[in-house]
Amino acid sequence: MKDQTARDSVEIEITGLSKVFGQGAAAFSALSDIDLTIRTGEFFTLLGPSGCGKTTLLRVIAGFEQPSTGSLRINGREVAGKGPNARPVNTVFQNYALFPHMSVADNIGFGLKMLGKPRAEVAATTADMLRLVKMEEMAERKPAQISGGQQQRVALARALAPRPRVLLLDEPLSALDLKLRKEMQGELKRLQAETGITFIFVTHDQEEALTMSDRVAVMSAGRILQLGSPHEIYHAPRERFVADFIGDTNFMELPVARLEKGGAFVTLPGGSETRAELPEGLTPVIGEKVTVVIRPEQVQMAPPDAAEMTGTVESATFFGTDTHVHLRLSDGQGFILRRQNSARTEEPAPGAVMGLKLSPGALRVLRD
Ligand SMILES: Nc1ncnc2c1ncn2[C@@H]1O[C@H](COP(=O)(O)OP(=O)(O)O)[C@@H](O)[C@H]1O
Ligand SMILES: [Mg+2]
């Protein structure tokens, strides 16, 4: 159950947090200047490439690592310096780590038993959890007798059983094949909605982050580059790294023709001027080039006389739902456009000259 008041309250507040491993010449800064507020009941995702510090941040939140500097408050209480048992947090690891000799039910009840809960309570909660993850019929099986996806459900049930306020999930789906992964993505969303527990989910998969999260923090080299809803980070990336990491992207270097409130008019290859959104606080210099980003699905083909710019087709690849067309613009820059195949149309032939129209609001200047 999620009620709106709970959702608006702060669950985790991290300020000025850093983590340095090692000392002296061997010191390595795994996390720098992390400021982060996570709301109660939120599905929050840390997204970034391998090695950017996602697991380290989760381990700091869980209490397996201590921050080098900064504050970490969970549900209003400072927990920096305290161990894992002092916080209402549980973790699901990538390699489920079930006990092989224990049944599914005993695996789920294990944590509660360790906490010294009465036998009747352990049994009742275990039964609830088995129902929650739809594993009632397999309660007596051993981990080796169930599939990978089912093991993942058991690991989730085990982590949810002590009713933590916050569940940390470190790439929990990456060991599953694509079809199972999709299924488990839906299951995770359902579990989170049904329990109302705050989920902090780690992935390097941008699609997973976009489809599952309330908000996403994009990380690179130990820092959070941008934090926002999936829409914000996809449609309004502030930096090149974010634009590049999330989805296919065209980058163009274009001169600024003039400025207006919140936007800049840039000159497209071929000479026409069009408006590009500006990130807050950036004022480019007229006549100088800026980096502009445009998503391949925000460009449409048009007859050359009705177009804002033209390109020559280099190749076209059919993907079923859409076709990716690689073009060379009149000034020599490469450009990719994605055509939705809503009708059964011929693929554009290499060498053909194609007019291009941009969706309104499609161009954005990057901070770079
Ligand atoms: N205990 C440790 N000692 C030294 N370096 C570490 C330690 N743990 C992680 N690192 C380094 O910190 C960086 C971030 O690692 P990690 O948080 O595991 O990244 P991610 O989960 O995003 O792939 C990596 O360069 C890794 O080698
Ligand atoms: Mg990791």
Image (cartoon, rainbow, N blue to C red):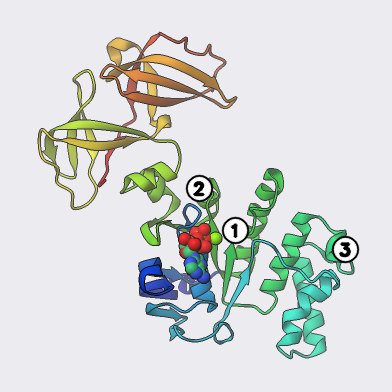
Front in this rendered view, residue 192 or 309:
309
Residue receiving disc 3: 137
Q: What percent of the width, then of the height, locates residue 102?
A: 85, 73
Residue receiving disc 1: 171
Q: What percent of the width, then of the height, locates residue 25?
A: 36, 69
Residue drawn 24% across the image and 32% down it = 253
Give the structural element (helix, strand or loop) at label 1.
loop
Image: 361 above or below 281? above
Label 3 with label 2: CB-CB less than 8 Å: no
Q: Is residue 292 visible?
A: yes
Q: Quadrant of ligand 2?
A: bottom right
Q: What percent of the width, then of the height, locates residue 137?
A: 88, 63
Spatial CA distance of label 3 from label 1 is 27 Å
The verdict on label 2 being within 8 Å of ligand 1 is: no
Spatial CA distance of label 3 from label 2 is 34 Å
Give the structural element (helix, strand or loop) at label 2.
helix
Q: What percent of the width, then of the height, locates residue 271?
A: 18, 20
Residue drawn 43% across the image and 15% down it = 314
Spatial CA distance of label 2 from label 1 is 12 Å
Residue receiving disc 2: 206
Q: Earlier in the sequence, mark 2 or mark 1?
A: 1
